[in-house]
Amino acid sequence: MRALRPERDALEITFPRVTGYRVELPQSELKAEFTDDSRLVLTPELVGPTHTKNSGIIGETADINVKHLDDARTSTLLMHLTQHLLMHYWRDSGDSPQMHLFPQLKRITRDWLDNYLVCQGDTRPAQLMYKQLADMACKRITAAITRAELPNHPVRALLDPYNPTGSTSHVRFTTSKTSRWETIGPPPKCHLNWVICDSDWEAEFCRIAEAHPAVRAYVKNHNLGLEVPYQYQSDMHHYLPDFILKVDDGHGDDDLLNLIVEIKGYRGENAKDKKTTMETLWIPGVNRLKTCGRWAFAEFTQVWEMEDELAKKIGEAFEDMLNPIILG
């Protein structure tokens, strides 16, 4: 696998290497915009053992079992979860907690508990007292608040200070994988000579990308170096999206849209966190930098609808461009 230089240098794709995010605390009243991905489904598989000695979200150690959780009051859970949210998600490092935010966060947390927490099997809402599950809940609530605040540009992406930009020009490696797509076009739209495919879906996507008239270039994120930091439960992880496309969404070839595409079949709870991170942190944070071009994100879950979904995504970008002109 290698970049075909210099004959395909016009198809080079560059991307920012993001190491984290800075979310500015809003000065006005907090609002939340919940979506289907705000929902957290507690299952025995996710929760784990129903009898455990664990540290609660306020640092106390207790011997907790399902019977014990039945005695936990909703008001107690609401208070502790809001406190965890305020102390760990809505204050800057080293700063004192902004206690004036507590009533607003409590109101939003109650809304989330009432409408977006689902308990299945032998699980209980009070299991959110476990720190890992509390962190999952707080991430969903924080993302909803960030989503509602996005028009005010509260997010900034933090780039690797030593290696802030990646490029398809640097790709060169050998592989024994035989499932691959030769990027010959016509016309060629990939800087690399092959795409390594992990599924038939990805090969089908390559066909669609090469055939679509609005796609100017594309690349599979395989040994490319595009990593998206995100938090799942209490730990930081790195998510590798599947593709990057350069799309003409009406701004012309000098201002192409960089579209990150994830091809997803089964969507577990971590898939929701990845998508939420892309939509509420990575994409708005990178776009706010104004030094890396324009970026968007799309997730495809049905291969037989993929071609229509791609066209829909490009159509939406056209609408975003035309509406201000029409309404202005």
Image (tube, helix red, strand yellow):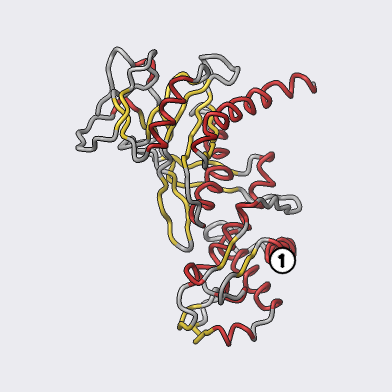
Of the 4 image quadrants, the one containing the N terminus is: top left
Farthest right residue in view: 327
**Residue where numbered disc 1 is placed:** 114
Q: Is residue 8 above or below residue 83?
A: above
Dividing the picture into quadrants, the one containing residue 119 is: bottom right
Question: Residue at the location (67% across, 23% down)?
Answer: 321
Which is nearer the eye, 226 or 86?
Answer: 226
- In the rendered image, residue 305, in percent from the top left (x then y), is placed at 55, 34
**Relative side of 280 to 225, left or right:** right
**Secondary structure category for the residue under label 1:** helix
Q: How many marks?
A: 1
Question: Residue at the location (68% across, 40% down)?
Answer: 152
Farthest front residue in view: 304
Of the 4 image quadrants, the one containing the C terminus is: top right
Q: Residues within 10 Å of mark 1 (few under 14, many from 20)?
A: few
**Relative side of 133 to 185, left or right:** right
**Relative side of 45 to 6, left or right:** right
Q: Is residue 239 above or below residue 304?
A: below
Dividing the picture into quadrants, the one containing residue 176 is: top left
**Relative side of 144 to 47, left or right:** right
Dividing the picture into quadrants, the one containing residue 326 is: top right
Which is nearer the eye, 115 or 172?
Answer: 115
- In the rendered image, residue 23, in percent from the top left (x then y), is placed at 58, 48
Residue type beneath disc 1? Asp
Question: Residue at the location (64% across, 65% down)?
Answer: 117
Question: Residue at the location (54% across, 28% down)?
Answer: 294
Q: Is residue 253 above or below residue 286?
A: above
- In the rendered image, residue 111, in percent from the top left (x then y), is placed at 73, 62
Q: Is residue 225 above or below residue 230?
A: above
- In the rendered image, residue 107, in percent from the top left (x then y), is placed at 74, 63
